[in-house]
Image (cartoon, grey):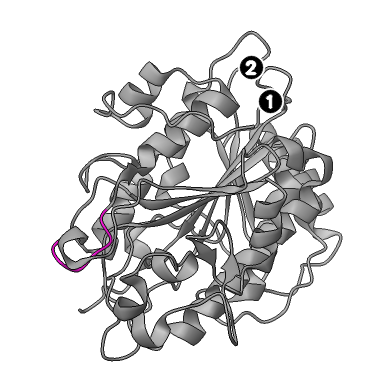
Amino acid sequence: MTCEALTPSRRAVLGTAGALFAWAAMPRFAFAAGNRDARFVTIILRGAMDGLTAVPPVGDPAYQDLRRSIALSTTGPNAALPLDGFFALHPAMVNLARLYAQGQAAIVHASATAYRDRSHFDGQDVLESGFERPGRTESGWLNRLLATVPAGAGVNPGPKLKGVSVGTVAPLVIRGPAPVLGWAPPALKPAAGDLAPRLADLYGSTDPLLARTLHEAIETGKIASGLDVRAQGGPGDPIGMAQMATGAARLIAQPDGPRIAALAFEGWDTHAQEVGRLGRLLGGLDGALAAFERELGETWKDTVILVVTEFGRTARVNGTDGTDHGTGTAAFLVGGAVKGGRVIADWPGLKPQQLRDGRDLAATTDLRAIVKGIAVDLLGCSPAALGEAVFPGSLAIAPMRGLVA
């Protein structure tokens, strides 16, 4: 199967490495749902993560025969990490396994969006826009969620809730009219230390709005600075993932900072030689989750991180020790506010007659139900508003309750 190349025209370029842009200079505030000062982070894995390798169903009798050369086992060299007797975890994800054991991580398996074709572009569009079909909107569901979180009763006490996009290109999921900050890890040598004060002095009297925005950018940049910036190795680089996670965590951990964040990690298309490639990618994701836990400190207990991808991969291994575009996959929920220690799955099975189109893991859980459950229980959102404004036309999809501790 031929894969489309990602181009900048597919997503608006909102920044360059090391730069921060502010779309609204507004008063900041603490975001609280009940007695919880909640944070919600969405991580998009672009390229279609293989959920059957990330979270192998080692207890399914058809698994080993389908996966053959790339199958994992809980015994022997490079053994998968046991979870519940039926499912295991890829050995590269030791931090996630620890958090799972501590009740701070959960996995929703056999999940997917409403999209049932196999184009990366369209699959990502549906995943991030929140619509059932591609090409419907220029805004994402996370941006619309920012405007939907209710005010009053201690929830969202400010006029608007602010989000942050981390990376040189803002994911569609957080693009839209709601105010969003953008930050990317620096890739170039920092400018002279006196540049920012000189710019502030220059625009302070001639353009007060720009001066305020510049001040906010400088202050936010200081919060996320101090990273160990090293050369990155392209899409899916573990160093880049850790740097993005560290910067995002430092920003949302601030008492007056944003409370909702979006990141996108590239490179998850594993058509060939999947074992080494996916192990490196999953190790990078695992390191990013550890960075969030470390940098969030006390605010970790109020955090939910949702990790999703546009679709899964074929149940059968192909002739190049990889997998092709599929349907069902796994979603991760991580954070101190997660009711974890479990794999949530209406497992469809891997026998030939149970596969979708005879080739894919069938999807039995809609990702929108997962997001809705988090939005209701963590952020206090209305199911009706979620079904009408955040995920239009999805009123029939009920929130998955009980995901938040």
- Compare marks 2 and 1 and give the one earlier in the sequence: 1
Q: Is residue 203 visible?
A: no
Q: Residue at x 80, y 45 (%)?
A: 201
Q: Quadrant of the image for the N terminus?
A: bottom left
Expressed as whole percent of the image width and height from the top left, the position of residue 111 reads 36, 50
Secondary-structure class at tag 2 = loop
Checking the image for residue 405, the label placed there is none
Q: CA distance from mark 2 to mark 1?
A: 6 Å
On screen, residue 69 versus residue 393, left or right, reads right
Q: Name the residue at the bottom extreme.
A: 320
Q: For mark 2, what is the residue? A: 155
- Where is residue 52? Give x, y as percent: 40, 67
Q: Is residue 196 left or right of residue 169?
A: right
Asked which secondary structure carries label 1, the reply is: loop
Q: How many marks?
A: 2
- Residue 168 is inside the magenta segment: no
Q: Which residue is mark 1?
A: 31
Say if 195 sits above or below 147 in the image.
Answer: below
Give the side of residue 4 with respect to residue 333, left or right.
left
Frontmost residue, 16 versus 113 = 113
Q: Position of residue 185 (x, y in %)?
A: 67, 64
Magenta-colored stretch includes residue 361: yes
Q: Are marks 2 and 1 in contact (CB under 8 Å)?
A: yes
Of the residues shown, which amino acid type is indicated by label 2?
Val
User: What residue appears at the point 73 percent right and 59 percent down from the top-left corner?
Assistant: 291
Q: Residues within 10 Å of mark 1 (few under 14, many from 20)?
A: many
Chain part drawn in magenta? 356-362
